[in-house]
């Protein structure tokens, strides 16, 4: 697939402003970012890019006195996974019970649950705060014989963790073809592919998915969560749980308010470096 590379210049530069630009650009479809001396570079699929949407999310930048400008160019058509395959990531240990690792960096010692992730152009290795918080929530949830819906599955990491924690079945979907394929691949190398289904599409495909789910997981940006919450609610089983992340703590109140209009009650919330995770249940 072809990408645009958008170079954002932030003046005056600060890491907080840089994080905010990344969060806002993510709402406009950007998938990944690289920090620069004056801001960051963002990458977005050409077929999904809308400069109008980017301008809209940046027009009321919430940092007073900070300006954000950008230049758009066509990204080099190269193997975007090359650097990842060369570097990978160090094992991530969560609550001394779960270790997430790639094929190049094996964990030292033995853990009750081990998940291997081969991230081929997909988001979700456990290195990001939002993924770690949801994995922590899964460790604290009784998943035995439960049915899981994984919205925006990415690498499939959340589904795989849930299945290794005893879930009966997991269905994940993603709008990105690479991610949907990569999730299937990771399910195979973790030997849970007989209980995992990966679907290409957005939340509208839920109308074609049979049955309800005991646990619904969604690690997506704020605007998509707000738009898709009614669909998530429809697919929740009685006394089911909804776990949301992918947004800043400052956005929590907005999502809690929206969830309440759908009859969802807040069970718990956590935060990590200004990122938030909310857990709801049906009333």
Image: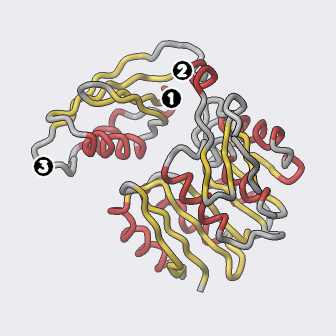
Nearer the N terminus, badge 3 or badge 2? Answer: 2
Q: Specify few, some or many for label 3: CA neighbours under 10 Å numbering under 14, 14-19, or 20 or more.
A: few
Across and down, in percent, residue 276 comes to 44, 61
At a point 48% along the width and 13% down the height, the residue shown is: 76
Could you give the CA–CA distance between mark 2 and mark 1, rounded to whole angstroms? 6 Å
The reply to whether dot 2 and dot 1 touch (C-beta < 8 Å) is yes
Residue assigned mark 2? 2
Residue assigned mark 3? 64
At a point 80% along the width and 49% down the height, the residue shown is: 197
Callout 1: SS: strand
Answer above or below: position of 214 versus 9. below
At a point 51% along the width and 75% down the height, the residue shown is: 268
Label placed on residue 45:
1
Answer above or below: position of 159 versus 85. below
Left/right of residue 194 with respect to residue 167 in the rendered view = right
Nearer the N terminus, badge 1 or badge 3? Answer: 1
Could you give the CA–CA distance between mark 3 and mark 2, rounded to whole angstroms? 35 Å
Callout 2: SS: loop
Callout 3: SS: loop
**The quarter of the displayed image where residue 90 is located:** top right
């Amino acid at each position: 697939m072809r990408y645009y590379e958008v170079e954002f210049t932030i003046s005056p530069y600060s890491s907080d402003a840089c994080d905010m630009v990344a969060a806002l650009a993510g709402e406009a479809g950007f998938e990944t970012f690289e920090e620069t001396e004056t801001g960051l570079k963002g990458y977005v699929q050409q077929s999904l890019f809308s400069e109008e949407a980017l301008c809209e999310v940046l027009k009321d930048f919430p940092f007073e006195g900070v300006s954000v400008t950008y230049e758009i160019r066509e990204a080099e058509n190269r193997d975007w996974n090359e650097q990842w395959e060369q570097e990978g990531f160090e094992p991530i240990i969560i609550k001394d019970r779960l270790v997430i690792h790639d094929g190049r960096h094996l964990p030292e010692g033995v853990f009750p649950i081990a998940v291997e992730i081969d991230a081929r152009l997909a988001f979700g290795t456990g290195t990001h705060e939002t993924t770690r918080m949801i994995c922590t929530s899964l460790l604290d949830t009784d998943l035995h014989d439960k049915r899981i819906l994984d919205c925006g599955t990415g690498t499939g990491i959340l589904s795989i963790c849930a299945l290794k924690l005893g879930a009966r079945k997991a269905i994940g979907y993603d709008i990105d073809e690479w991610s949907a394929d990569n999730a299937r691949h990771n399910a195979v190398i973790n030997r849970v592919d007989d209980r995992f289904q990966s679907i290409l599409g957005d939340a509208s495909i839920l109308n074609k998915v049979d049955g309800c789910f005991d646990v619904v997981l969604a690690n997506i940006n704020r605007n998509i969560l707000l738009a898709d919450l009614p669909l998530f609610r429809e697919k929740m089983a009685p006394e089911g749980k909804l776990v949301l992340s992918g947004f800043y703590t400052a956005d929590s109140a907005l999502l809690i308010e929206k969830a309440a209009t759908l009859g969802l009650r807040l069970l718990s919330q956590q935060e990590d470096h200004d990122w938030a995770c909310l857990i709801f249940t049906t009333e």
